[in-house]
Image (cartoon, grey):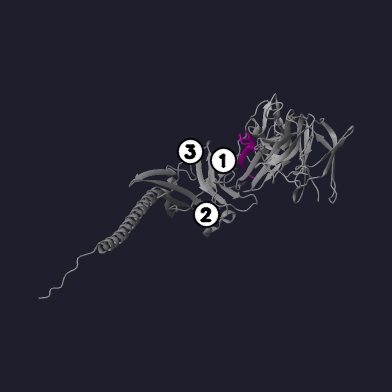
Amino acid sequence: MYRKAHRGMSLMDVIIGTALMLIIFTALTGLLRSSIQVSALAKDRSIATTLAESQMEYLRSLSYDSVGTVGGIPSGSVPQTSTTTQNGILFTVRTFIDYKDDPADGTGAADTNGITTDYKELKVTVSYLLSGSTKSVDLVSNYAPLSLETTTNGGTLKINVVNATGSALSGASVRIQNTVLSPTIDLTTFSDSDGIVFLPGAPTSTQYQITVTKAGYSSAQTYLRDSTNQNPTPGYLTVVKNQTTTATFAIDVLATLNIHTYTPIATSTFSDTFSSGTSIASFNNTVLTTDALQLSGSPGSYPPAGSAASSPIQPTYLAGWLSATATTTIPAGTAAKYHIVDGAGTLLPDTALPGNASGFTGTVDLTGVSTTTYPILALSADLTTSSASSTPQVNDWSLSYLRGPVPIGSIPFTLTGAKTIGSTGVGAPIYKTTVVTSTAASGVAPLTLEWDSYGLSLPGYDAVEACNAPSYVLSPGSVNDASLILASSTTNMLLVSVSTSAGGLSGATVTLSRTGYTKTVTTTACGSAYFGGITSSSGYTISVSKSGYTTFSASSITLSGHTFYAASLE
């Protein structure tokens, strides 16, 4: 009898089946995890909602007159902020209560009964952190008095928050403090979509302190009248019964100013007197003896030719090549010439340095050699003799170059803004922003400042050149870089910055003169003309000219200390 064989599962069947089971299990696990997360999210929100409802019920259980917050307007015994932990999560409960003016009987000055504190608005916000994100639940309710509305015997505070252009700024934090009232007031709220904080029912007082802030923005505030600031601007606000006190505060996005400090371009020199072989990269039939480079061997056995090359010369902050020279001793029947080679030891072509292929015996001008094409140079020497008894010698050689500007760190400076917050009893201005700091070791000082115009002082140094010269006019949110090239300080100096609408103007002629003194300077690439060591005096005249541009002239100028002066040509 024929019997059909039954085939078992192959290894491939097992692998495929296992893979399918893993896929199904992974999907189910992800679904379970998502379900758990959704459940946790719903539970946390339910807790927050319950806390908000409980707080609102508590507020509405209080009598109308007692509904207020500690340090708030209106004042009361309810904390502005409290916290509680449930289900392992910290919940923050914030209670805000303020008066509202019902439009049914007119608002503000048009209110028919003159009472603008018609009812109270209660707002409870419960916030918590979930997976790194802040979640919140808000409840808002109105609470009206049981009888007719009554005056609070106070006045109204109206705070306008604007930006640098005068446009309304919403979401700014406005803190109102008054420490002389009992109970004291310490309330923080936020400007609405019109940039306004409106607080009816504020107790009468002359000591309301206002502070306006926002993350990433400058700040504004009122200032105390004291023995120094005898005329604060603005001073503390005064609330008068049944009157509205209005004040406007301007804040805007902070600006960035990066101050860079450098030493001037200066001449540096590579030189070798051959007292050691540390600056020689290669010898070929040459040696160092008695502080000179010569052919190897001894009298009677000198080879007919030899060569040597210096170590590569690779200056940092290279501004330009200047010259090379060598001192030689050439007996009869011998010769010694030197060449300029690049970092790989290859001769610079005559198109880059005329005569280099033949070699040099004296000083050679390198100012035409491109620092971009040839950032590294070296010296090489070829020595020859027609007599085995004589050798030429190279006694020393050198190569000079310009280096700079080089960053210099730890430079102290002071920035002073033009905005004032008041004046002394004799009328001296008190400036809002004064920054006393220094550049880091890298020669940079990154500063975050509010929009303003900032003057600069540099104790111990003269600014001999400036790309973006002071004063620094910063607009909101702008990023500004200023580079200062410094030299030793003189008692009185002047830096004239010449510019057009396109920026600094180089090659302009700047003349500074007064009776018995005249000096003319040509502006740098940044448009700077520096006059150091001048006499403190009045009656100076500054004249600026350049072909193709309008001229500039200013007279009766008093110069004393360190002065930065801007001149514009078109």
Along the line of sight, which residue is nearer the eye, 174 or 438? 438
Kindly identify which numbered label has been placed on residue 239.
Answer: none
Residue 367 locus on image (x, y percent): 77, 41
User: In the image, which residues are magenta?
Assistant: 432-451
How many numbered tags mark residues here? 3
Residue 128 is left or right of residue 566, and the answer is: left
The part of the image, by quadrant, that contains residue 26 is bottom left
Residue at figure coordinates x 44%, y 54% from the top left: 140
Which mark is nearer the camera, 2 or 1? 1
Select label 1 or label 3 by which is in front. 1
Residue type (three-letter) at the residue carrying disc 3: Pro
Q: Position of residue 323 (x, y in %)?
A: 76, 37
Mark 2 Cα within 10 Å, few/some/many (few <14, many 20+)?
Answer: some
Mark 1 Cα within 10 Å, few/some/many (few <14, many 20+)? Answer: many
Most distant residue in the bottom direction: 1
For residue 440: magenta? yes
* Residue placed under numbered mark 1 in the picture: 208
Q: Position of residue 510 (x, y in %)?
A: 83, 41
Confirm whether the magenta stretch covers residue 381: no
* Disc 2: which residue: 101
Residue for point 60% across, 48% down: 253
Label 1 sits on a secondary structure element that is: strand
Q: CA distance from mark 2 to mark 1?
A: 22 Å
Badge 3 is on which residue? Answer: 183
